[in-house]
Image (cartoon, rainbow, N blue to C red):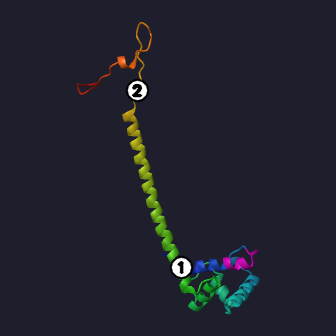
Amino acid sequence: MMNESQLFQLLKNEMLLNYQKHYPYFQGNWKQFSSQDIQNLIDLIEDKQNQRISEKWIYTHLKPETNEKLPRKDMLDILSQFCGFSGWDEFVFKHKNENTFVQTTKKKSNYFWLIGVGLMIVLFIFMWMNKTATDSKTIEIQDEFTQEKIADEDVKVYQIDDDKKFL
């Protein structure tokens, strides 16, 4: 389960991706965000959300690699809306559910993978046992003097198990 600090880092990544949709030539991260990029981002947010964030706020909260504490919720709402969500609550809800779904799917896929391997092993053993049980040998019997093959109906074969004789 993701904590709020990890979710904020995820929101920062989504903000960069959204920024790159408008400015595709920018391929960096927050550390490489220039003063011109910051101004472009401020303008984008102002145009899309009719809200204003300060340059100082960006330096304080977005540029650092890690954040000790979460920004105010009203700012999180503005950033979430910039990324296409109704607000921070929706962003958190969707990403926590995605994370839970991914973890559940991984557990299920591991379970099915183990079942599949187990079934293949059982099938292999069954086929190997069946092959050894039904392996029959063909022996051609020839007349000692004429070297001609003796007809199958003229030959009788007995199987002896534990001193018992079977035809």
Chief secondary structure of the magenta portion: helix
> In the picture provided, is 108 more to the left or to the right than 78?
left
Nearer to me, 165 or 118: 165
Task: From the image, tell me which residue sits under label 1.
Answer: 94
Task: From the image, tell me which residue sits under label 2.
Answer: 137
How packed mark 2 is, by other alpha carbons closer than 10 Å (few <14, some 14-19, many 20 or more), is few
Residue at 74% x, 86% y is: 39
**Residue 32 x %, y %:** 71, 77
**Residue 49 x %, y %:** 67, 90
Nearer to me, 61 or 106: 106
Please give the range of residues in magenta: 17-26
> In the picture provided, is 4 more to the left or to the right than 52?
left
| Residue 148 lies in quadrant | top left
Residue at 46% x, 69% y is: 104
| Residue 88 lies in quadrant | bottom right
How packed mark 1 is, by other alpha carbons closer than 10 Å (few <14, some 14-19, many 20 or more), is few
Q: Is residue 117 above or below residue 163?
A: below
Q: Is residue 104 magenta?
A: no
- The residue type indicated by label 1 comes to Lys
Q: Is residue 87 above or below residue 104?
A: below
* Residue 87 in sight in this render: yes
Nearer to me, 140 or 9: 140
Give SS at disc 1.
Answer: helix
- The residue type indicated by label 2 comes to Lys
Residue at 45% x, 65% y is: 107
> In the picture provided, is 13 more to the left or to the right than 93?
right
